[in-house]
Amino acid sequence: MSMPAARHDTAPFDSAEIEPRQSGATDDATTDASGRTASCAPIDTPGLPCKVEDGRDPWIVVWDGPDDPGSPLNTPIWRKWLYTAVLSVSCVCVTCCSSMAGETYAGMERTFGVSQEVCILAISLFVVGLGTGPLLLGPISEFVGRSKVLHYSFAAFFLLNFPVAFAPDIAVHLVFRFLSGFAGSAFLSVSGGAVTDVFANAKVATPMMVWSASPFLGPVIGPVVSGFINQNTYWRWTYYVILIWAGLMLACLVAFLPETLDAELLRRRAVRKRKETGDERWVAPVEKLDRTFVGALQKSIKTPFILLTTQPMVLFLDLWSAMILGILYLSFGGVPYVFRTQHGFTTEQTGLAFLGIGLGQVLAVASQAYFNREYRRVAAASPDGKAPPEARLTIGKYGAVLGPLGLLLFGLTSFRTVHWIVPILMTSAFGAGMVLAFTGVFTYLVDAYRPVAASALASNSFMRSAFAAGFPLFGLQLYERLGAVGGTCLLAGLLFLCAPLPFVFSRIGGRIRARSRFGAA
């Protein structure tokens, strides 16, 4: 899952979205909300406070004041929320597709004559596509705008799911699972930026909270829906439902989502002015930048790995969040195993067992208002009125405790003699801890490594995708060898090893940043 570079002013969700835009263009010039050229933020990061140079070239196309109706910030409020709703549901569709495959294994085994280990690749390869797609799609969005990337990538996601649904053999099924994940990854790397494009800094927290919940809720909703489908009909209907859903969302995207990127809209206005006046001197700020797609792509791929190999905080925080997501994707095999063996659940009932994780995620999102107030309190008490980046880790501390505690309690209550509702309720602590931990890590990486924020988030996305793709491959063997209680408690122990990280870095993070050439001052 990945996320565009973001704002840095007030709330945790203002500073990072759930999936990073894996773009390398973090040091280029940009435009502010009025379209004037600035040099302290990337062109696709609107709203960041920076100094705008006076005496600009009169032929540079800018907005006609703060009330220019062409500016995305002046979009009517009902349209802003329509964009947010369409993008959020589309993101849920993509991430839901990643986990719905978990309930299709029995049908795939009968149809294709393969083992369950091979069927698990349907999840792993899709997640690999989600992790690698933004390396290409992020830089493309900088050159052609958001709407084209979102429209064409979702159209590709829709079309590529036809071979998945109608695959004649397992090879075709798995290849197109990867390709559909690759296409759908734009909604984890680009779509959140469209939300921040249309809402001002002071208003963006709530819509970003809504959008940011979608990549978390999608993987949990997937087993619930898929469980009912595979209990009552043919396994391919899992993907028929995805096709129907994706087709409806594609129509909504084309009908309701225009271009929202400030820089691209100004470029289009400059093109119109040149055509209307015949004067080629009219130019948009983005057209004056000395940049190439190849250069942006190289930076998109190279910088995240430089950060992983040279910045210990990036490495350890990425490992922590990757461990959490890996365990979540392992649970798509682990949770059904626990409830089938311990409580005799059917396929549709095991899908419903994931509602506990979903409940915890919803509660964690609802708690953001409290953490927003705490962050503002710390900022107000600071001498310069700005909270240090380490203040972002406060929310992560709660996640570091709740995540492993929820897993441990889930494991210790997974006995046949304990009513099934108890372990389901225990998983809600894991769901809440996951959201709180991710929020703390994402926002801290953005604030602590602001000069290379997009690459810092891209490194996190890569690591998370690698773990999420790999963990399901050994999940069933883990539970068969250690049992429901032992397997879950082992995973809880791994998360407990990571629990000190936000506490340690909140104390020494400032000293580490001071010695880093990438760290924010």
Image (tube, rainbow, N blue to C red):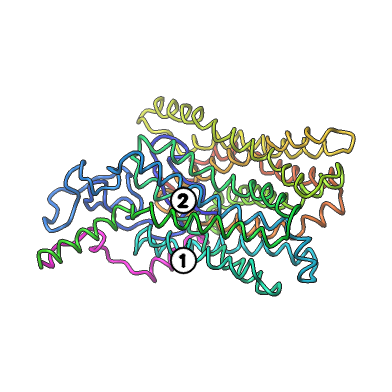
Work out which quarter of the rendered image holds the N terminus and state it: bottom right
Q: Which residues are magenta?
A: 279-306
Q: Secondary structure at mark 2?
A: loop
Q: Quadrant of residue 291?
A: bottom left
Residue 8 forms part of the magenta stretch: no
Instruction: Give the vertical position of 41 relative to 499 (above or below).
Output: below
Residue at the spot 30% in from the left edge and 50% down from the top edge? 40
Q: Quadrant of residue 76?
A: top left
User: Percent position (x, y) of residue 260?
Assistant: 33, 52
User: Percent position (x, y) of residue 385?
Assistant: 36, 30
The number of discs equals 2
Q: Are marks 2 and 1 in contact (CB under 8 Å)?
A: no
Residue beneath label 2, please? 516
Closer-to-camera residue (325/27): 325
Left or right: 404, with 361 as reference point: right
Residue beneath label 1, please? 136
Closer-to-camera residue (392/435): 435
Instruction: Give the vertical position of 432 relative to 307 (above or below).
Output: above
Q: Secondary structure at mark 1?
A: helix
Distance between the Cα atoms at labels 2 and 1?
Answer: 28 Å
Left or right: 145, with 406 as reference point: left
Work out which quarter of the rendered image holds the C terminus and state it: top left
Residue 286 forms part of the magenta stretch: yes
